[in-house]
């Protein structure tokens, strides 16, 4: 199975020969902006859907998405994403619903072996897993470079900072999977087009401002999907 990691072009290029090491990330607990939480220093966070957001957050003009083959990873190093365990505990256990989010996140992060057996569920329901330690270069099959200075409109109309939760993964996870497939030139059509066509089909007044705007957006993305300036795929 293919899974992805978003980063800067320079880090992707280095990872292609040296492997991908863990990096300390800061993130807010889901839903409640209580405090910043430091990610595990031992883990690399991999995703089928959220990699593009990780790339954009690198704050580089040239971003990249690494493609990783899970069959080439040692299963002993695979763990669920903390966000997945966090959501499940909050939903199913009344006690945890009263816990401070930062405290619960840190407990999950600091005790990964307690939840290790749920990595497949994390991948299925959230689209994310963690890899403990360096992702070996032999597991990285290729990476796509995206120069934002040449083609940023597609990304700015796509990023949803709340995508990486169970509910949003179920609703719009497929959108991001197709977007990554388009980035790697596996499909020709951007998911933005179908998304807008579905909305348009449910509008009764086809002459309304909303309907006109959606048709304009559809034509815009039909044009943008043909424009692959600044996109390069590097096979390894």
Image (tube, rainbow, N blue to C red):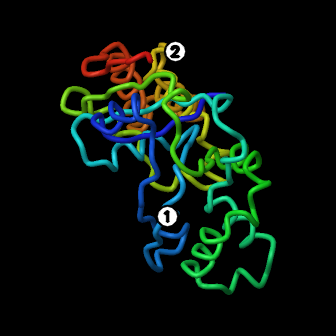
**CA distance for labels 1 and 2:** 32 Å
Where residue 229 appears, as percent x and y from the top left, is 25, 18
Between label 1 and label 2, give the one nearer the viewer.
1
Tell me if residue 96 comes above or below residue 149 in the rendering: below
The answer to which image quadrant residue 225 occupies is top left
Q: Are marks 1 and 2 in contact (CB under 8 Å)?
A: no
Which tag, 1 or 2, sits closer to the chain's start?
1
Label 2 Cα crowd, 10 Å radius (few <14 / some 14-19 / many 20+):
few
Q: In the rendered view, does 66 fall on the left or right side of 231?
A: right
Where residue 85 appears, as percent x and y from the top left, is 70, 63
18 or 189: which is nearer to us?
Answer: 18
Name the residue carrying label 2. 186
Which residue occupies 18% across, 32% down?
149
Residue at the farthest front position: 18
Q: Secondary structure at mark 2?
A: loop
Name the residue carrying label 1. 39
The answer to which image quadrant residue 11 occupies is top left
The mark found on residue 150 in the picture is none
Which residue occupies 68% across, 52% down?
79
Where residue 53 appears, as percent x and y from the top left, is 42, 45
83 or 208: which is nearer to us?
Answer: 83
Q: In the rendered view, does 219 fall on the left or right side of 198?
A: left
Tell me if residue 30 comes above or below residue 22 in the rendering: below
| Number of disc labels | 2
Which residue occupies 74% across, 57% down?
116
175 or 203: which is nearer to us?
Answer: 175
Looking at the rendering, in which quadrant would you find the N terminus? Answer: top right
């Amino acid at each position: 199975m293919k899974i992805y990691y978003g980063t800067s072009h320079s880090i992707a290029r280095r990872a292609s020969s040296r492997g991908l090491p863990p990096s300390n990330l800061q993130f807010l607990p889901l839903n409640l902006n209580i405090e910043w939480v430091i990610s595990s220093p031992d883990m690399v966070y991999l995703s089928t859907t959220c990699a593009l957001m990780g790339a954009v957050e690198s704050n580089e003009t040239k971003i990249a998405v690494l493609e990783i083959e899970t069959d080439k990873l040692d299963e002993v190093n695979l763990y669920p994403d903390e966000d997945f365990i966090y959501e499940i505990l909050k939903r199913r256990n009344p006690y945890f619903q009263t816990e401070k989010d930062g405290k619960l996140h840190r407990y999950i992060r600091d005790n990964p072996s307690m939840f290790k057996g749920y990595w497949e569920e994390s991948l299925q329901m959230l689209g994310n897993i963690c890899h403990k330690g360096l992702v070996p270069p032999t597991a990285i099959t290729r990476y796509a470079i995206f120069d934002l200075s040449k083609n940023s409109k597609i990304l700015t109309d796509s990023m949803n900072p709340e995508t990486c939760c169970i509910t949003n993964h179920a609703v719009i996870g497929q959108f991001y999977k197709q977007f990554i497939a388009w980035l790697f030139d596996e499909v020709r059509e951007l998911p933005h087009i179908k998304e807008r066509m579905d909305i348009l089909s449910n509008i009764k007044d086809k002459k309304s401002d909303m309907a006109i705007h959606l048709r304009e957006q559809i034509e815009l993305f039909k044009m943008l999907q043909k424009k692959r300036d600044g996109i390069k795929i590097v096979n390894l």
